[in-house]
Amino acid sequence: MAKYIFQRLVYMFITLFIIATASFFLMKQLPGSPFKAEEKLSAAQLEILYEKYNLNDPLPIQYLNYLGNLFQGDLGVSFQMNNQPVTEILMSRIPVSAHLGIQAMIIGTIIGMLLGVVAALYSNSVIDYASNIISVIGISIPSFIFAGLLQYYLGVELGILPVAFWGSFAHTIMPTIALAIFPLAISARFVRTELIEVLGSDYIVTARAKGVSNATLMFKHGLRNALIPLVTVMGPMAVSLMTGTLVIEQIFAVPGIGEQFVTSIMTDDFPIIMGTTLFFAFFFILIILVIDILYGIIDPRIRIAGGKD
Amino acid sequence: MRKTNWLLLALALVLSMFLVACSGGNDDNAGGNDSGEDTSSEEGGSEEAEGGEPSGEQVLNLIEGSQIPTMDSSHATDAVAFQWLGETMEGLYRLNEDAQPEPAIAEGEPEVSEDGLEWTIKLREDAVWSNGDPVTANDFVFAWQRAIDPETGSEYGPFMMNDVLKNATAINNGEADVEELGVEATGDYELKITLEKEVPYFHSLLTFGTYLPLNEDFVTEQGDDYALTSDNLLYNGPFILEDWDPKANESWKLTKNEDYWDAENVTLETINVNVVKETSTGVNLYENGEIDRAGLSSEFVEKYAGSEDYRTMPEPVLFYLKMNQENEALANADIRKAIAMSIDKQSLVDVILANGSIPSNGAVPEDFVSHPESGEDFRELNGDLITSDKEKAKEHWEKGLEALGTDSVTLRFLGGDSEVAKEMDDYLINQLEENLEGLSLELSSVPFEERIARDEKSDYDIQNSGWGPDYLDASTWLNMWMSDSPYMTMNYNSEKYDSLMQEANNDLLTDLPARFDKMLEAEKVLIEEDTAIAPLYQRSRAYLWRPSVKGVQFNPMGADFTYKHAYIEE
């Protein structure tokens, strides 16, 4: 297992290197310059700025310089947020986004799973239909609609939760709920469908015949097998949470990483674009790795590399 | 120029739809509706002329549309940076309620030499930095040299100083030493400024953020860390900035500066600012009483217009269509006139924008500059130079087509990709194609950076474009249409216009009334005769504004607002 993980980590760095290279050259194709008030600067003034920030060097030279700094852990400084080090921006903003994302993921999948289990146990009952409706709403209505509704009713009308901003646990509740709706709906659907199938399979019937209790049957034998497809979708789900936070952070005025990413692309802030792209890529690859490892834990048949060779 | 994210606008629109729908049962926002249609728009300057007394807690809670990009005055370029620099730092002069410079760190009015090139300014001796150092003439010399030094890489330094301060252009190009800049400390509290040529608006330029002083010892000691957080800054203005760290937070706080030389005239104790980008979030916060002002987009205007809290603020920002004369059809003045006249501008501002914006019929906005002798507004003097007139538009159109020997014209229309821009461009194209038979427009909606890039390459036929002023003089609007201007991308080349503006910019610098008349004449050539651009509208902003907040001053350039004299009257 350790060897497998090590191997995967090596692949991860190769992938990151390729992503860094591709993004660097793609980013340089963006129109415009990273400078502020660009529309007011004359060509001569822009030229002086390009020279000062070494943006006139041939692309391969710029690329090598960038890689050199990257290997030393230096992501450069932002253009739009004058001179602010990118590493520090990422370091102070990622925890905020991660806090929301992880909280939403955990709450969403746990409630979703429970909902799915209940729906599967009482399939084609009122409870099942209710759970179905919740899932459909959750999947089809975008999270920012929920965010707006929550903000208006819980924040303004009832006044029980802060409308926006960041600081206390209370501030995290509404953004978390808004973000959790999607993973909740997805997990409920997957768990229900899969569990109904599993519960009808031979080994469950056998176990039941042997007198295994209902709870053990459900959680030890049933749910464990029903989780495989859920784990598979958790990767894309985590990614959708990442993009979901862009919007949710905006609505609740949360100082996360999402809006930095959007703004940086709009303004050609090269160092921030690279920093956030690399972070998102790293995060995505890491999620895939974690999922592959989870497969092995949930279903021993899918151990990717055997312990013996 | 503010860059908007189309996604956010889309969200705001969608959100607002159900917010408006939801708000039926909410009765606490309709209070004080008896003022009817009186939406008290502010005509520049502060509104508390009746005179009130400060009462209650002197705390102002605001939101801002974006983070302060930088608090380093050499690098500041945008409205947000100039806003908070203006509250926490002070230069030689500041703008008063009538948009005129009044002495700040300067002790009185400048002494100007006969030829207008040498300015001697005495500084007050009781102004101090927040570390206790006195504010001296050297602080200005250091700051201005830093802003123009190519090593600093400042955007607005050369933009504001080239061709204004002596040797600025040469220094920025690396052809002269930074010490040769036309500014000199002739004593601890006396500053001598030498100009490259006479600049009629130099006095108001001295109120601009790029001309703020910097404490040399402090800035040098901080090095690359200067202005990274509120702890890496020194202040000499009415307020002190606290808890500002753009790496981590989206909020900051201003507290009254007790050591400020004019502290006795500052009433507010605290200003709390949070970044909120979403309009609906701002409105919700306002409804909850957490903030004292929220900007409104057009879909909220309908809900709040007429309420006591609703207020619109005209801005000196113009929008117009640029017509590239490289295109054969657009090189024809009749075609350009037809285009400019066929758009119903009143419906554009009433229906699409709905925020108090007004139709524009010239190249210089309302309430921006007035005649040095009579005091009459530039816009009023020149009046409407081109108005919506469908019949006349058709006449010009047919005349133009005849001259071109064709019956159809196809043009590329370059527009922005924000939700509002798209809606507006659709409207414009609809109007043009409907009123001008044989005209077809191909719209490309592109992001801001791409639009700028295409503009620089003259890669468009018609472009929906806008401009905000950089100094208080009509030439900030008119210079860019000269054929040798760096902003001239639409190949408009009129000898008559160029020579009128040349005269205004050179020979007439010592005769300001004649200069003003010359620029009035030039605007007539530009719009009435040549119709080089098709004016669309002058922008306004709509706000929810707590009526208890008084004394906020509105500025036509630099910082949007001044809070020095603001107070709360409960």
Image: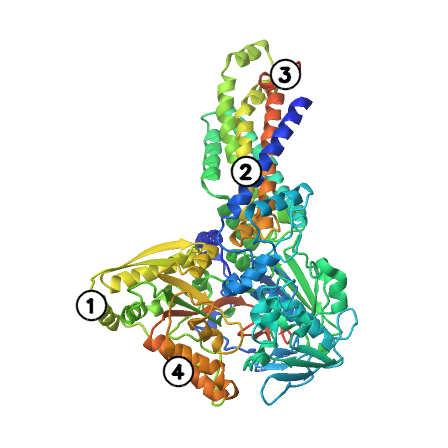
Residue at the (55%, 78%) spot, across then down: B45
Disc 4: which residue: B521
Type of residue at label 3?
Answer: Gly
Marks 1/3: CA distance? 83 Å
Marks 2/1: CA distance? 59 Å
Disc 1: which residue: B402
Disc 2: which residue: A239
Callouts 3 and 4 on one subunit? no
Type of residue at label 1?
Answer: Glu
Residue B449 visible (yes or no): yes
Residue B333 or residue B180, whichever sits in front: B180
Q: Residues within 10 Å of mark 3 (few under 14, many from 20)?
A: few
Note whether B528 is above or below A31 in the view shown. Answer: below
Residue A54 figure quarter: bottom right
Residue B525 drawn at (x, y percent): 36, 78
Type of residue at label 4?
Answer: Glu
